[in-house]
Amino acid sequence: MSEILVAKNINKIYDEGNIRTQVLTGLDLTVNAGERIAIVGTSGSGKSTLLHLLGGLDVPTSGEVWLHGKCLNNMNETERGEMRNKHLGFIYQFHHLLPEFTAIENVAMPLLLRKEVPIKEARQQAVDLLERVGLGHRLEHRPGELSGGERQRVAIARALVTKPSLVLADEPTGNLDYDNAQSIFGLLAELQDTMKTALLMVTHDRSLAAMADRQMLLKNGKWENFDD
C-alpha cells in the first residue's frame, strides 16, 4: 500500500510563562491509501493536538510530518495551506460551516479557493455530493436552518468535494446523539470506500473506533496498547 502520511518521532511542548507542558511524546504513525484508522483517547490525551500537527495546522516541537513525500515542517504557512487544500479534508465535532452561506456555497468553497474550478462547475460538484449525502432537498438552506445531523452531512460533503487522499476527522460524531452518530459514521465510511479516501478519525467512542481497520490508543501523549 502507498503511504500518504508519515509522522516520525513527534513531540509537542507548550511553554506558557514558567510552565512547560509536554503534550505529545515520541509518536510515530503511518497512514496508507484507503486505510481507516481510529485514534482513541480521553479528553486531554493529545488527540486534537496530534490531528492539528498531522494536518499541517501546527508544527511539532520536534519530529517530522511527511505528506505525499514532502515534509510539512520545512514549508511556510502558505505552502502548508496549499498542501492541505490539495490533499486533505477536515471534519470537526462542531461543523464550522459559514453561517451566512447556503449548503451549496459551503461545500463549493474549497474548490473555489483553488481558483482552478469555474464557479458553475464547483457548484455542480457541490450539488452532486450533497445529493449523495441525502441533502438534495436542502441545497439552498443555511446552517441555521439545518439540524445537527444535516449540518454534519454538509461538513462531510465539504471535506470530500476536493477528492482528498486523506480525511482528518476530529470527534466527527461527538456532538450528535447515538442514532445520528451511527448514521453519520456509516455515511462517512461508505463515501470513504467509494472515493478511495483514507480516513484518520480521533474519537473517545470505542464503538465507532471498532469499525475502523486499525485502532490506536493515545494516553497522556503516548501510544498505549489497545485493550478491548
Image: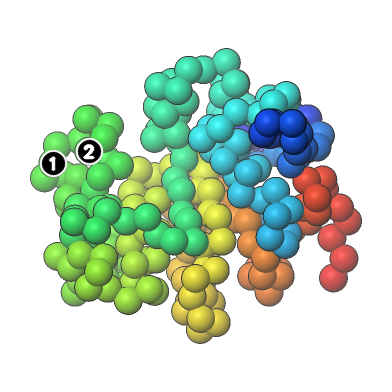
What kind of element bears circle 1? helix
Front-lying residue, 37 or 75: 75
What kind of element bears circle 2? helix
Q: Quadrant of residue 178?
A: bottom right
Q: Quadrant of residue 41?
A: bottom right
Residue type highlighted by circle 1: Ile
Which residue corresponds to mark 1?
119
Q: Residue 96, position in %: x, y? A: 37, 55
Residue type highlighted by circle 2: Leu
Q: Are marks 1 and 2 in contact (CB under 8 Å)?
A: yes
**Which mark is first along the chain, 2 or 1?**
2
Which quadrant holds the N terminus? top right
* Residue positioned most to the left: 120
Front-lying residue, 83 or 99: 99
Picture residue at 40% right of the left edge, 33% below the top: 86
Seen in the picture, residue 110 relative to 43 is either above or below; the reply is above
Which residue corresponds to mark 2?
112
Q: Residue 165, position in %: x, y? A: 49, 41
Asked if residue 212 can be seen in this view, the reply is no
Front-lying residue, 109 or 5: 109
Q: Quadrant of residue 151?
A: bottom left
Picture residue at 44% right of the left edge, 61% below the top: 94
Which quadrant holds the C terminus? bottom right
Picture residue at 54% right of the left edge, 68% below the top: 174
Picture residue at 68% right of the left edge, 74% below the top: 207
